[in-house]
Image (tube, helix red, strand yellow):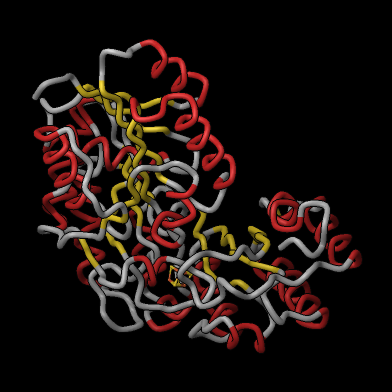
């Protein structure tokens, strides 16, 4: 190697899990290749790049839908300022869906799909040759055993929820997960124990897990693999860990609770979280079908009831503004919210529909929200029944112009 290479990850509040996973990956697989640093602010990154001209610098961006424009602007600015002295690589959901746009703004390479192996392979080649590949859109390479990649950078004291499952069998038309990760991958109890014990060595006993469909673990059909789940939770509890399951950053699909209601008792017995997140998305049966949710409103009601009976505070996820959603659909949703709040003390995390690349709904426009609906949402938020980033997301989608979204 002719020159020392420094690798910077640009971390934000929204990509911090991914940056943790990738940092752990590079620490474990390429420990001597780079001086790796995580930077949280653009100003800090710019300063670092300005100070160290004797190094070759590689900057990694993981791009999601939030702050996408801001991060594209950062990429452009870095390229304008530092030209070929800085190599900018990017990945993440937006990179997978809109690679050309990111290249046009100044990135040197875009990694699409699952990037563990493609990133390692690129960095090894670059370390030895200091040359970029001619193909600027880097396709995924087959992953090794999913249990062979670390879940967090424990040597640096940087932790994230353990990604227990990647992908989702459901195919909701607004959600990127099944389209980004068509192959379901899972990690095993032994893997979790190994890394949980590393946490314990650092005095940490709280375990959080990432599963897009929170009760799908080790299960192929629409129920719950209660035997494996109970064994998993029991053994980790007995080793002294505090477990969080079925709550952020995961949520539970209603039919899993309806088909296997005894899961509520199992969770009650072993987990520390008092809240469970339940996916529902709309209170309109017509929209439920349109967005390809494979459950009914009655399933949602039953799941909320079962979980509530075990004492959980159920947080129901709702999106408003879906394509083709009408005023009557929105009123149905708000009435459903009020009904579940009154009968089961449920609370609601409200979102505004955002178009995500690679999903069937990417090219469809969100629908504007009427003033009467906004007033009702304000009222629900004021009463503490609803919360969330709905208004912020609405503003992001439309700006000041209703035709922008
Ligand atoms: S169940 Fe959740 S993770 Fe799965 S496709 Fe639907 S919204 Fe996405």
Query: Which quadrant of the view contains residue 141?
Result: bottom left
Asked if residue 354 can be seen in this view, the reply is yes
Residue 4 x/y as whole percent: 18, 19
In the picture, measured across the screen, residue 91 lies left or right of residue 185, that is right
Q: Position of residue 158 (x, y in %)?
A: 31, 30
Name the residue rendered at 85%, 63% in the picture.
376
In this rendering, the count of numbered labels is 0
Tell me the quarter of the picture where residue 161 sits.
top left
Judge left or right: residue 224 versus residue 321: left
Instruction: Mark yes or no: residue 385 visible.
Output: no
Q: Position of residue 244 (x, y in %)?
A: 38, 50
Q: Residue at x 29, y 35 (%)?
A: 205
Quarter of the figure with the C terminus: bottom right
* Residue 63 x/y as whole percent: 45, 47
Q: Is residue 345 left or right of residue 157?
A: right
Q: Residue at x 79, y 68 (%)?
A: 368
Q: Residue at x 21, y 71 (%)?
A: 227
Quadrant assignment for ligand 1: bottom left
């Amino acid at each position: 190697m002719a020159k020392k290479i420094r690798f910077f990850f640009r971390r934000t509040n929204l990509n911090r899990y991914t940056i943790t996973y990738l940092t752990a990956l590079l620490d474990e697989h390429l420990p001597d290749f780079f001086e790796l640093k995580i930077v949280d602010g653009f100003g800090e990154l710019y300063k670092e790049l300005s100070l160290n001209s004797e190094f070759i610098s590689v900057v990694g961006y993981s791009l999601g839908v939030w702050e996408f424009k801001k991060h594209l602007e950062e990429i452009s600015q870095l390229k304008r300022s530092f030209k070929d002295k800085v190599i900018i690589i990017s990945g993440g959901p937006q990179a997978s869906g809109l690679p050309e746009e990111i290249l046009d703004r100044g990135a040197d390479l875009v990694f699409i799909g699952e990037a563990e192996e493609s990133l390692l392979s690129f960095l090894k080649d670059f370390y030895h040759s200091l040359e970029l590949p001619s193909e600027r859109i880097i396709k995924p390479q087959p992953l090794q055993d999913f249990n062979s990649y670390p879940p967090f950078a424990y040597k640096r004291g940087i932790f994230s929820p353990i990604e227990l499952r990647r992908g989702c069998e459901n195919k909701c038309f607004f959600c990127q997960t099944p389209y980004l990760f068509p192959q379901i991958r899972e990690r095993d109890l032994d893997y979790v124990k190994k890394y949980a014990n590393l946490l314990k060595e650092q005095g940490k006993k709280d375990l959080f897990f990432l599963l897009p469909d929170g009760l799908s673990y080790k299960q192929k059909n629409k129920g719950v693999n209660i035997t494996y789940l109970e064994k998993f939770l029991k053994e980790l509890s007995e080793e002294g860990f505090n477990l969080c399951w079925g709550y952020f950053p995961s949520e539970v699909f209603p039919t899993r609770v309806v088909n296997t209601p005894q899961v509520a008792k199992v969770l009650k017995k072993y987990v520390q979280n008092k809240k469970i997140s339940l996916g529902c998305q709309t209170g309109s049966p017509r929209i439920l079908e349109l967005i390809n949710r494979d459950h009914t409103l009655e399933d949602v009601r039953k799941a909320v009831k079962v979980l509530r009976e075990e004492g959980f505070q159920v947080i129901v996820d709702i999106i408003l503004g879906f394509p083709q959603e009408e005023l009557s659909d929105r009123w149905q949703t708000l009435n459903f919210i009020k009904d579940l709040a009154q009968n089961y003390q449920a609370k609601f995390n409200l979102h505004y529909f955002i178009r995500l690349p690679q999903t069937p709904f990417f090219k469809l426009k969100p629908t504007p929200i009427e003033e009467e609906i906004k007033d009702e949402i304000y009222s629900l938020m004021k009463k503490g029944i609803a919360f969330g980033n709905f208004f912020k997301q609405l503003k992001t989608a439309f700006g000041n112009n209703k035709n922008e979204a």
